Amino acid sequence: MATVQVRLGGRRRTLLLGGIVMAGATCALALALAGSSSPGRPASGDEVAITPQPTSGDAITVEDAEAASIATDARALDPPTNVGELEAACRGYQANRRWTDLEACAHKLQRLAPKRAADFEARAAGETRSAPRIAGVEAALRVRNLKRAKAELDQVWTGSVAYPALKAKYDAAEGELIADLTARLGRVKDADCKEYNELLAKERAASPPRVATEAARRTPCATTTAPPVKCDAEKLAQRGQQQFAAGRALEAMVSYEAAYACNPVPRWSEKAFVAACNVGYLLKAKLHWRKLPSGMRARSVGICVENRITEAMLDAP
């Protein structure tokens, strides 16, 4: 029993000495660290704390750290967006006609929805390309230069959101010009259509082709057949007679006018007058009526009356 107690006492002394040694080592380490601190300032708990080192399995290389930093920066600059949100943003730019923003939005959408992105990109490109042309049409319409407006309009992308309204605006302006030219052509028509043709040629040079073509269709002027160098009035009149008999009174009027231009005798003008009355061509009828002597007027006015052209109408200025 005494032997056991001696052994236990020896163990206690050993443990006690070990504890004293460990405490002394800890104090020595604390004093060493305190001595390494800057003078005049006690070391903080953070400064004396020992940073745990990763084990060999958790070691991080310099390359890994750089890659992690780059990935973090990329996520901060270009946060992930789902397809629906990005499409909605693109549609908003399109609705507000912000074509540059739409192009950038479509570029972002390309990696998520290539087909939809292609539609947005086509829209942005077409609208951007058409923008200066649209401005050109508007500017030309403001100064009533329809020839320039038509040239610019032909360069506008027909798929543009602005095209339908712009085309309607141009068509309205062109319609007004056609109506105006039609009235002016009616005022200058005469037997030989000289002023008429001069006005028409001038308008063809200054306006889109349709303007002169449509105005001439609405207010026709039978162009006088230019007399040949050695014209034959009798032959021209004979052709007019054949045309009149075949029911082509307007063509007959032109042939009789050509005969009169070749040999200005009253009977060819009378024939032209009768042909004009048959087709209800009041302006031409009035022109030839003024060339007729009173005897011819008396015998031919009945033809016009039958076609609702009265003598009072023929005598009107």
Image: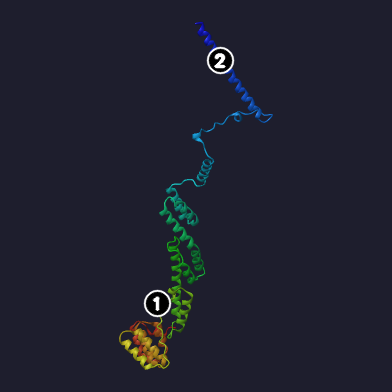
Q: Position of residue 6 (x, y in %)?
A: 53, 8
Q: Residue at x 46, y 79 (%)?
A: 201
Q: How is the image coloured?
A: rainbow
| Residue 31 in sight | yes
The C terminus lies in which quarter of the figure?
Answer: bottom left
Q: Is residue 86 above or below residue 173?
A: above
At label 2, the amino acid type is Thr
Residue that badge 2 annotates:
14
Please state the horizontal and vertical placement of residue 64, each as a whole percent of the image. Answer: 51, 41
Q: Are marks 2 and 1 in contact (CB under 8 Å)?
A: no
Binning the other alpha carbons within 10 Å of mark 2 as few (below 14), some (14 to 19) or many (20 upward) gives: few
Of labels 2 and 1, the one closer to you: 2
Residue 213 location in percent, x, y? 42, 76
Q: Which residue is mark 1?
A: 217
Label 2 or label 1, whichever comes before in sequence order: 2
- In the picture as drawn, the residue positioned furthest to the right comes out as 40
Which of the 4 image quadrants contains residue 33? Answer: top right
Q: At numbered mark 1, what does the secondary structure look like: helix, strand or loop? A: helix
* Residue at the limit of the structure toward the top, as seen here: 2
Q: Secondary structure at mark 2?
A: helix
Amino acid of disc 1: Arg
Q: Residues within 10 Å of mark 1 (few under 14, many from 20)?
A: few
Name the residue nearer the viewer: 69 or 196. Answer: 69
Q: Position of residue 116 (x, y in %)?
A: 41, 54
Location of residue 84 with respect to 221 vertically, above or below: above
In front here: 311 or 131? Answer: 131
Nearer to us in this view, 237 or 265: 237
- Gap between marks 2 and 1, in whole Å? 129 Å
Residue at the front extreme of this rendering: 3
Vertical arrangement, residue 235 with respect to residue 180, above or below: below
Q: Which mark is residue 241?
A: none
